Image: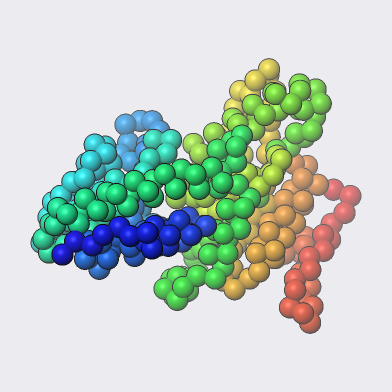
Amino acid sequence: MAGKVTLGAVDRLTAQRGHFEMVAALVRIASGLVGSRQVSYYEVTAATEGGQAPMVQDFLNPERQIVPQEMKLLLRAFRTRKTVRGTVEGRLTVVHPVQGHDGNGALLVFRVRRYLPAAHRELRKLLAIYRNFQLLHDRIERDALTGLYNRQYFGEVVARLIHPGRAYHQRRKDKEHGYWLGMLDVDYFKRVNDEHGHLIGDEVLVLFARLMRETFRYEDRLFRYGGEEFIVVLEGVSRESAFQALERFRLAVEAYPFPQGIRITVSAGFTEIQFGALPSEVIDRADRALYYAKNAGRNQICGYEDLVARGDLRQIEYPSHKNVHIWVKTGV
């Protein structure tokens, strides 16, 4: 028997405020409608150039490898924006397109014993509600000028990484790879506004955000933190890889032809997002590294842990277990 989309289900779905919570609620409700316990939600990022295939990732289980049979179904559903069916590892698999934004999208995937048309008709009703609610929610999560995620959504993402589930904590036993927070600041941005006006300043910020999208990976989260400050959350990389990603972006900004011949550079500080830390501590570490980079001449990348190891920053532990950081080198 097919389930029905009830007012209670709609209420549970639209009561969610964070993207992660919305997806989790959608998966739970959809599972009951279709009668399948094997439900996945994939996010798809369209390739921007070079004819590359779109990038696909299991949102609730990012480490999961997608087998070729399933990937073929996912890409077909993404490109056609239609429900597709096929067999993956001997199981009937149904893929429903969920939403689209800036050429990107999402897919809801079910492994079922048999296809029930009535159940999937009800599911499409639920997805129509979800799409409309997600569009409204997306406006709340994104910065109006640049289209990047905003500071409010940043808090949700960091809180989820700092206090994850047990599976994530087990994966973090791999000391070589982690999650890193990079804080970026456009150098001398006030001078741009003063000399060229706020309209040109806004254009610089829009182009800066576009460069972030083009330079960082699709799975990295990009935010406008406020004014000319931006943040990137780098997922599942080593410290050296995090530095290299930020350095590539620094070089891209330095070489970019901004309007009216304006030369723009960027300074950045980055730190590891440590399990169990307070969000304010993570922000403080990245901000201290950024502050050091700017006072050391700007247009450079500084890692908090490297600065502490060299003695350029000193970390003091207080009885309250709050970390207070002191910038040691002065007059730089």
One can see residue 253 in this view: no
One can see residue 233 in this view: yes
Q: Position of residue 45 (x, y in %)?
A: 38, 42
Q: Position of residue 34 (x, y in %)?
A: 22, 61
Horizontal relation, residue 22 to residue 253: left or right: left
So how many labels did they put on this image?
Answer: 0
Horizontal relation, residue 282 to residue 216: left or right: right
Q: Quadrant of residue 270?
A: bottom right
| Residue pictured at 39% horizontal, 35% vertical | 103
Horizontal relation, residue 215 to residue 7: left or right: right
Q: Is residue 133 above or below residue 258?
A: below
Q: Position of residue 268 (x, y in %)?
A: 67, 47
| Residue pictured at 14% horizontal, 53% vertical | 117
| Residue pictured at 42% horizontal, 62% vertical | 12
Q: Residue furthest bottom?
A: 319
Q: Quadrant of residue 32?
A: bottom left
Colouring method of the image: rainbow
Q: Is residue 230 above or below residue 204?
A: below
Horizontal relation, residue 103 to residue 238: left or right: left
Q: Position of residue 281 (x, y in %)?
A: 69, 65
Q: Residue furthest front?
A: 7
